Image (spheres, rainbow, N blue to C red):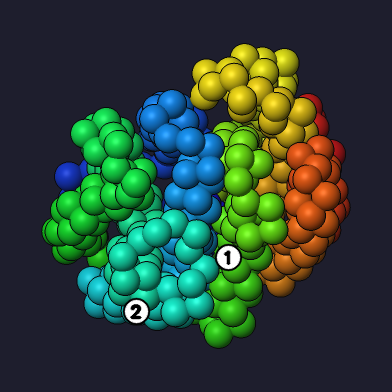
């Protein structure tokens, strides 16, 4: 999913910091301190998610993995679409708003309502390939709850509550893994194991966030003001990102179905986990610029030490792709070439996501939307064509081409200068 923090508006003092009561570190935080806990949370959740789908692959036929996976992707996409624009705005404005508690609950209400309505429409259109009961009601409820779960990451990051973010994401991963084993043999086991933990985690985090937001210290700068153009651009961006990460499994499921979809979904799930590190790096870069008053070049330079590490890990992933898929079952090894191509796409997207972060630092939100939109169009059209021909390689190439286009549209001189050894 896309989780991007942003910058304070003009009129806020550079380097001014906002703290909450009970914060362990009210002062400026390094990129590592921002990037590290978020990455640890993401990696831990990804490992648990990996184990979840490995177990699902061994307990269910590939066609059932594909149908459940495409439905989960559908709901996940709705959640991103419902929360996407407000996610970015809330992350930027919650700590600076004149009435943060009101902003928190109004935003949550809007996101839940939007997610519920879109889920209702998806159910009425029978977009889910899994045999869920009362599709319009089930998709409406779970889409609203998932949208709130997505938004809560933004809330916790804005409040600098990374320990709660870790507990939320890891708790979700651990409980759904336990339920998957308990519900083994049920045709709805995968979906129920994924959905039930949300019913517990979302209310608990909502209570904690409400208590935490009451402790926000008064800000001496002007209250944050959000423009309609900013919100519109961020929503366009989130819809485009959703079309890529959640739309691809749905497209493949509708066009191809069967075991082909199951194999593609497993590879796509691994791609999303790998890509999340680049997205978090972009988020941490912008958050660092916001909190410490850095210009775009210094903000990008702060990320320089992390980029080679990510590229190195992705290279190892490309080499080990067949062995990784073997864990899911021998039949999934057929997706080795697809997984390798997807990880190459992630390498490109590391720079692309950093470029998107640089654009947000300079408040060029329209360029961010154009970059994500062009990527979505090229990727989804290419995937549809490849799925109709049963070509896994074509799906991987489509992502690479889309990622290249995204990076080219988003690229700025600031990123090149920031990644160089010396300031120009």
Please name the residue that numbered disc 2 is placed on: 113
Where is residue 10, by image quadrant?
A: bottom right
Residue contact between numbered discs 2 and 1, judged by CB atoms under 8 Å? no
Q: Residue at x 80, y 61 (%)?
A: 381
Residue 320, compared with residue 27, is above or below; it is: above
State the image coordinates of residue 106 (x, y, percent, origin top left). Answer: 30, 78
Which numbered disc, 2 or 1, marks the residue closer to the eye?
2
Query: As rendered, which of 213 and 324 lies closer to the eye?
Result: 324
| Circle 1 residue | 238
Figure check: 308 above or below 402: above
Q: Is residue 175 above or below residue 103?
A: above
Out of 379 and 413, give the one closest to the viewer.
379
Residue 241 seen in the current view: no
Left of 72 or right of it: where is 302?
A: right
- In the image, taking residue 352 as reference, residue 248 lies left or right, namely left
Of 326 and 292, the residue lying toward us: 326
Name the residue: 30% across, 36% down: 185
**Left or right: 270 with respect to 199?**
right
Mark 1, Cα crowd under 10 Å, few <14 / some 14-19 / many 20+, is: many
The earlier-in-sequence mark between 2 and 1 is: 2
Please tell me which residue is depicted at 81% across the width and 38% down the height of the picture. Answer: 393
């Amino acid at each position: 999913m896309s989780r991007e923090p942003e910058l304070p508006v003009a009129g806020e003092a550079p380097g001014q910091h906002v703290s909450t009561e009970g914060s362990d570190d009210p002062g400026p935080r390094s990129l590592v301190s921002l990037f590290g806990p978020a990455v640890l949370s993401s990696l831990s959740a990804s490992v648990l998610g990996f184990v979840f789908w490995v177990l699902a692959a061994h307990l269910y036929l590939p066609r059932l993995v594909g149908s459940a996976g495409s439905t989960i992707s559908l709901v996940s996409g709705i959640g991103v679409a419902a929360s996407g624009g407000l996610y970015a705005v809330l992350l930027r404005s919650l700590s600076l708003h004149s009435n943060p508690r009101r902003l928190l609950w109004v935003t949550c209400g809007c996101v839940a309502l939007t997610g519920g309505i879109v889920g209702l429409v998806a159910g009425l259109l029978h977009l889910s390939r899994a045999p869920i009961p009362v599709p319009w009601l089930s998709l409406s409820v779970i889409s609203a709850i998932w949208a709130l779960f997505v938004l809560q990451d933004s809330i916790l990051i804005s409040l600098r509550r990374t320990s709660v973010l870790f507990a939320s994401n890891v708790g979700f991963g651990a409980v759904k893994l336990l339920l998957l084993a308990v519900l083994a043999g049920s045709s709805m086991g995968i979906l129920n194991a994924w959905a039930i933990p949300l019913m517990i985690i979302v209310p608990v985090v909502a209570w904690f966030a409400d208590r935490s937001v009451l402790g926000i210290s008064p800000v001496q700068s002007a209250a944050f003001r959000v423009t309609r153009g900013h919100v519109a651009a961020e929503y366009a961006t989130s819809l485009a990102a959703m079309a890529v990460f959640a739309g691809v499994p749905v497209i493949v499921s509708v066009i191809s179905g069967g075991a082909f979809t199951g194999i593609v979904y497993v590879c796509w799930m691994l791609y999303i986990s790998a890509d999340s590190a680049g997205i978090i790096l972009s988020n941490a870069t912008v958050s660092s610029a916001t909190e410490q008053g850095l210009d775009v070049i210094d903000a990008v330079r702060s990320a320089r030490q992390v980029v080679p590490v990510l590229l190195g890990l992705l290279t190892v992933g490309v080499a080990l792709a067949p062995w990784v898929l073997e864990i899911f079952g021998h039949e999934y090894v057929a997706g080795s070439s697809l997984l390798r191509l997807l990880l190459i796409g992630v390498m490109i997207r590391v720079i692309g996501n950093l470029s998107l972060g640089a654009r947000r630092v300079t408040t060029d939100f329209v360029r961010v939307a154009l970059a994500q939109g062009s990527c979505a169009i090229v990727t989804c059209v290419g995937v549809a064509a490849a799925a109709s021909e049963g070509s896994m390689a074509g799906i991987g190439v489509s992502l690479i081409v889309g990622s290249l286009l995204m990076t080219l549209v988003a690229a700025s001189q600031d990123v090149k200068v920031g990644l160089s050894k010396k300031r120009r």
